[in-house]
Amino acid sequence: MKKIIVLCLVSLLGIGIASAQQKKAEKKTVTTVFATDIDCPHCAKKIDNTIPYEKGVKEVKVDVPTQTVTITYDPAKTDDNALVKALAKLKIKAEVKK
């Protein structure tokens, strides 16, 4: 009888862990490319040192030759407009590239 109860508890624990992992995998991220007016490595360094600390930002890639900034973020915590404003605080003009 004890073995059956222990077996049931272990299986319930396994189901709970699997369910929690599935919910964690469902978190979504959005990647947006911004066209900017950056033209030097100093501007890129400013972005790399500041934007990753904005709420919800997961990853930032700056490409100076093409004047683009690619940002991956959690849409539940921030959006494109907030990121444009964050770039504007750095005196960088940005708009969503289509």
Image: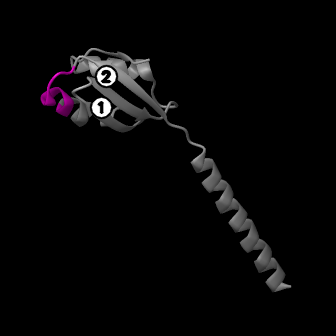
Secondary-structure class at tag 1: helix
Pinpoint residue 48: horizontal percent, then vertical percent. 24, 35
What residue type is disc 2 on?
Ala
Q: Quadrant of residue 51?
A: top left
Residue 57: in sight, yes or no?
Answer: yes
**Residue at the spot of label 2:** 86
Majority secondary structure in the magenta region: helix
- Which quadrant, please, contains the C terminus? top left
| Residue range corresponding to the magenta coloring | 38-45
Q: Which of the pair 83/65 is nearer the observer?
A: 65
Q: Quadrant of residue 36?
A: top left
Per the model, the C-alpha gap separating discs 2 and 1 is 7 Å
**Residue at the spot of label 1:** 51
Relative height, residue 56 to residue 80 (above, below): below
- The residue at the point 14 percent across, 26 percent down is 40
What residue type is disc 1 on?
Ile
- Are there few (<14), some (14-19), or many (20+) residues within 10 Å of tag 2? some
Would you say residue 41 sits in the magenta stretch? yes
Relative height, residue 11 to residue 24 (above, below): below
Are the residues tagged 2 and 1 within 8 Å (C-beta)? Answer: yes
Q: Which mark is residue 4?
A: none
Pinpoint residue 73: horizontal percent, then vertical percent. 44, 34
Residue 55: in sight, yes or no?
Answer: no
Ranked by sequence position, the earlier of labels 2 and 1 is 1
Relative height, residue 33 to residue 19 (above, below): above
Pinpoint residue 25: horizontal percent, then vertical percent. 58, 49
Count of numbered tags: 2
Secondary-structure class at tag 2: helix
Pinpoint residue 34: horizontal percent, then vertical percent. 36, 22
- Are there few (<14), some (14-19), or many (20+) residues within 10 Å of tag 1? some
Specify whether 19 is left or right of 1: left
